[in-house]
Image: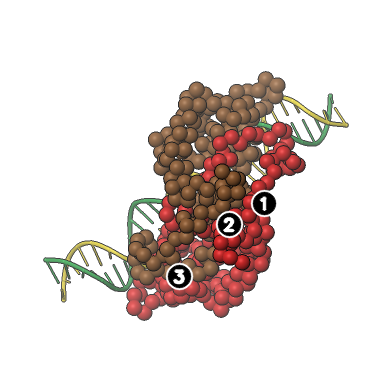
Chain colours: A red, B brown, C yellow, D green
Amino acid sequence: MTAHKTTQLDASRLARLPREVAMDDDAEASALKMGELSDLLGYSLKRAQLKVFEDFLRCVSSLQLTPAQFSVLLLMEKNPGRNQTEIANTLGILRPNFVAMLDGLESRELCMRVRSAHDRRSHNLMLTDKGRATLARAKKLIATKHEARLNEVLGPANRAALLEMLATIARDF
Amino acid sequence: MTAHKTTQLDASRLARLPREVAMDDDAEASALKMGELSDLLGYSLKRAQLKVFEDFLRCVSSLQLTPAQFSVLLLMEKNPGRNQTEIANTLGILRPNFVAMLDGLESRELCMRVRSAHDRRSHNLMLTDKGRATLARAKKLIATKHEARLNEVLGPANRAALLEMLATIARDF
DNA sequence: TCGTATTTGATATGATCCATAACGATTATC
DNA sequence: GATAATCGTTATGGATCATATCAAATACGA
């Protein structure tokens, strides 16, 4: 169990058949040639992102939480008392668009806006008890269903490597 | 030059400082704690995808091509004579939404719809000379600027591994 | 201290993308 | 030849994303 091992790719899992067996999806007629699209990172990135979000929604469908809503609740839990601008900024959400989003969460009593005593312009954001409970259940669903599924498809080492590379792109690109 | 080597991760490039040096972006006040968000694959996936698309647009800005438009032109080149349903389906675009997109490309004389002789309902799609020329220039820009930049940030081996994993998710997830 | 500039949450608005239903023309099926 | 299915299209609504602007509150400079 060396640290060396954990950062290696599991090539046996990644190498797959070159798409000749069992035409299922878009193979009504003869499949189209993808050409250079297969090597375009942005394309695979987008397709993978859609699939992952789709699965996320399935896994937490019982809680009616979108990925964006989940990320907001998470930030509120880890950073209670921050205002709307701060939460929205760190998530890349524009303040005007964050208002309706908060309205939704607040109307479901998952979080609350509290006028700050020091600066009466801003709202201190915090989870309600219901919000904390919902978030806890969401975390459990995501860990046991969503991320577990990714581990099955990729393998733990690959999943960790993928996460690291994506974070690198998001940070340094 | 073993296949083994090419599918290994370059850990020395992936390992980065744990984000303590040079607060630049959203670090107006004290940076917020990201919590479990750092381990949520979908989150990093989305952020990375936005960055990559952003860079794509920059690199081909002289040609005024979006990622979606580029993928359509590419498919038309590799599969001339296919109809709108086929092209749209393989790209995950719904047929109604594909109409306006084609209108745009056709009005710029990058491609043309030709009524099929065998089935007068469908349009055979194909690039114009201008479309082929534009696509060729786009490919060059993407290869020399866009993908080259990704190679710099990730390293060639990591870039290949990333692409493989993303394709795996898009396919098997 | 007063006047100005900035910040915060909010509203209005438009662009873009994504999804569904339905239609006319054409073709396939029985 | 009647019915069903397919193709491109239109219309439409929802969701996301971006910009300008506002009132209230605060910060700041003369």
Residue type pointed to by label 2 = Gln
Residue that badge 1 annotates = A12
The answer to whether the residue labelled 3 contacts the one labelled 2, judged by CB atoms less than 8 Å apart, is no
The amino acid at mark 1 is Ser
**On the picture, is A77 further left or further right than B19?**
right
Percent coordinates x, y for residue B2 in the rendering? 59, 45
The image quarter in which residue A38 lies:
top right
Mark 1 chain = A
Q: Distance between the residues labelled 2 and 1?
A: 12 Å
Mark number, residue B33: 3
**B38 or A91, which lies in front?**
B38
Q: Relative to A109, say whether B110 is above or below.
A: above
User: How many numbered dots are placed on residues in this image?
Assistant: 3
Residue A136, compared with residue A92, is above or below; it is: below
**Left or right: A79 as drawn, with respect to A137:** left
**Residue contact at pointers 1 and 3, CB within 8 angstroms:** no
* Neighbour tally class for label 2: few under 14, some 14-19, many 20 plus, Cα within 10 Å: some
Tag 2's secondary structure?
Answer: loop
**Can residue B158 be seen in the rendering of this structure?**
yes
Q: Which mark is residue A8?
A: 2
Say which of marks 1 and 3 sits in front.
1
